[in-house]
Image: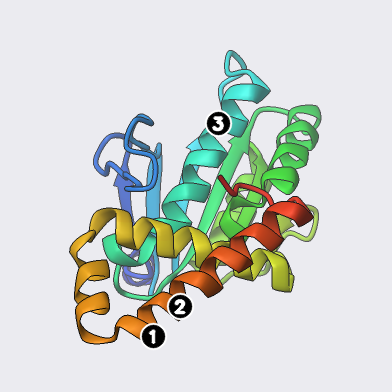
Amino acid sequence: MVEVGARADYFTWEADGRVLLRSDRHRKRPQLIPDAIATTDQLRLFIEVDRRSRSLRRVESNLAQYDDFLRAAYQRSFPDWKEPWVVYVVGSSERKKRVARVAEQRRVGGHRWAVLATGAEARSWLASKLLEEPADNSVRAGSPAKQTLASDAAEVLRTTHDLFSSEADLVGVLRARQPKLADAWRRSLWELHTHLRAEGAHGLR
């Protein structure tokens, strides 16, 4: 019993509906409500239990919400620097392949993700992350995508746009204090934006 109690102290578990997540980037999108959140000293797992009635398009939409949240709001909502994972638990090996394919395409904000078959595989993988037991190498999982210069530059533009959309007075302050520097900065951003659009960078407006 002592060992079981000690192992239970390795992590915290918040069940369905206890935590709502929202990204400020897309205010019109519905809130994210993970089926569970498990947290250790180093990790935070956002766990989604896949339902067969959910289409792959809805899975992709759900992952897009996580993408927005992890990019724009995760560090503000959880300022403890714990590494986030998005974890899908699915009902069959075939469903696992399909959901993993969607996750690979979406990339989930460049963060880590895993797709687990329910049963022994899910138990083994979760135990490896939460209780530091040996891992199951059959799990489909993704590491942070290697960022190209173009994707990094596009992310700078997106975050700059989000910052000045929410804090419009900052532009006026910069122009009042450093007018030449502010104008040069804006020209540089516009040139970067024009170049990235010509290159077809994803997600630029």
What x and y, as percent, mark residue 38?
Answer: 40, 55
Q: Secondary structure at mark 2?
A: helix
Residue 185's tag is: 2
Q: Amino acid at mark 1?
A: Leu
How far is the residue under mark 2 from the one under mark 1?
6 Å
**Circle 3 — which element?**
helix
- Residue 144 visible somewhere in the drawing: no
Alpha carbon separation for disc pair 2 and 3: 35 Å
Mark 1 highlights which residue? 181
Q: Is residue 21 above or below residue 73?
A: above
Nearest the viewer among 153 and 119 is 153
- The residue sitting at 42% across, 51% down in the picture is 69
Residues at circles 2 and 1 in contact by the CB criterion of under 8 Å = yes
Q: Please say if 167 is above or below 42.
A: above
Residue type at numbered disc 3:
Ser
Query: Amino acid type of disc 2?
Result: Trp
Labels 2, 3: front one: 2
Residue 163 falls in image quadrant: bottom left
In the visual, does 186 lie left or right of 196? left
Query: Mark 1: few, some, or many residues within 10 Å (few <14, many ≥20)?
Result: few
Mark closer to the chain start, 2 or 3: 3
| Picture quadrant of residue 22 | top left
Residue to which mark 3 is pinned: 61
Residue depicted at 64% across the width and 51% down the height:
114
Quarter of the image holding residue 201? bottom right
Secondary structure of the residue carrying numbered label 1: helix
Left or right: 57 in relation to 162: right
Q: Nearer the viewer, residue 47 or 174?
A: 174
